[in-house]
Amino acid sequence: MKIILLGPPGAGKGTQAKFISEEYFIPHISTGDIFRKNISEKTPLGIEAKKYLDEGKLVPDEVTINIMKNRLGMDDCKDGFLLDGFPRTVNQAKALDSYLGSVGQKIDVVLLIDVPKELIFDRMTGRRVCPSCGASYHIKYNPPKIEGKCDVCHSDIVQRKDDTQSTVKSRLDVYDKQTEPLIGYYKNQEVLSIVNGTGGINQVFENVKSNLKDIHK
Ligand code: ADP
Ligand code: ADP
Ligand code: ZN
C-alpha cells in the first residue's frame, strides 16, 4: 500500500505512522526525521536545512524533492511506503506524481488527519522527543513511564526547538498557505480519505484502520 499522511503539524502523523508502518509492513518515511538526522550529524544537507527548521519555514522544494526521489528509489519502497510530512506543497505533490508515474506506480490513499486548531497548539507545545532514538511523547497525552526519560533507550527527552510557541505559530501559517491546498489537489484525484483525529491515540488508530479497510490494493 502506498499512503500519504496529510495534516497540520502536531496532528499526530508521526504517532500514527509508527502504528501503520507496523500493522501494514511498510516503511515510514518522514522528511522531518531525515532533516533532523542530517542536522544532528552536521552533514551538508543538515547545515543547509537547519536554518529553515529553526524558523519553522519549509526547506526549498528542490532540495526536498531530490531527497525523496532517492529515498523512494530504495529497495524497501518497492511494495509500498508511508509518507509522513511529504508532500507539503503543490509543487512537491506534482513532482511526486510524475516520479511515481515514471516508475509505473501511484498513491493508493491520502489520509488527512483532521484535528481542530485548538487541539493542535496543545499537542505541539506538549510534545517531547528522544534525541537518540526519535521516539515521541506528550507531557499530558502520552507521557513516558519515567518522567523525562525515553521508554525505549532511557535518554533524556527534550522539546524540539521548533515546538516553542512562536515557531508553532509560523508553522501553522505555513501549513495554511502552502500545505492546505493539497487537500483540494488530492480530493480532485479521488484519493483523499478524512480521518477523525480528535480522539485519543488508540482511538485515532482505530479510525485510521477503518478508513484503510475500504482501500483495495
Ligand atoms: P511536524 O511533525 O510537526 O509536522 P516535521 O517533522 O514533519 O514537523 O517537519 C519539521 C520541519 O522540517 C518543517 O517545519 C520543515 O522545516 C521541514 N520539513 C519537513 N518536511 C518538509 C517538506 N516536505 N518540505 C519542506 N520542508 C519540510
Ligand atoms: P505530527 O507528526 O503530525 O507533527 P505527532 O505524532 O508528533 O504529530 O504528535 C504531536 C504530539 O501530540 C505528540 O506529543 C504526540 O504524543 C501527541 N499526540 C499524537 N496523537 C495524539 C492524540 N490522538 N491525542 C493526544 N495527543 C496526541
Ligand atoms: Zn530513545
Image (spheres, helix red, strand yellow):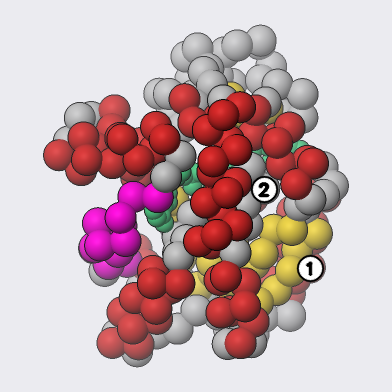
Across and down, in percent, residue 210 comes to 79, 68
Tell me the residue at 75%/63% (across/down): 195
Q: Nearer the viewer, mark 2 or mark 1?
A: 2
- Residue 13 located within the stretch drawn in magenta: no
Tell me the residue at 39%/78% (across/down): 94
Give the overall secondary structure of the magenta segment: helix
State which quarter of the image contains the C terminus.
bottom right
Position of residue 130 relative to residue 73, above or below, is above
Tell me the residue at 70%/21% (across/down): 139
The one nearer the camera, 86 or 58, is: 58
Distance between the alpha carbons at the discs numbered 2 and 1 = 18 Å
Q: What stretch is highlighted in magenta?
A: 58-72
Tell me the residue at 42%/45% (across/down): 57
Q: Does dot 2 land on a helix, a strand or a loop? A: loop
Return the residue at label 1.
210
In the image, what residue type sits under mark 1?
Answer: Ser
Residue 140 seen: yes
Specify the quadrant of the image occupied by residue 145: top right
In the image, is 105 to the left or to the right of 191?
left
Return the residue at label 2.
11
Position of residue 41 relative to residue 212, above or below, is above
The one nearer the camera, 75 or 136, is: 136
Specify the quadrant of the image occupied by residue 180: bottom right
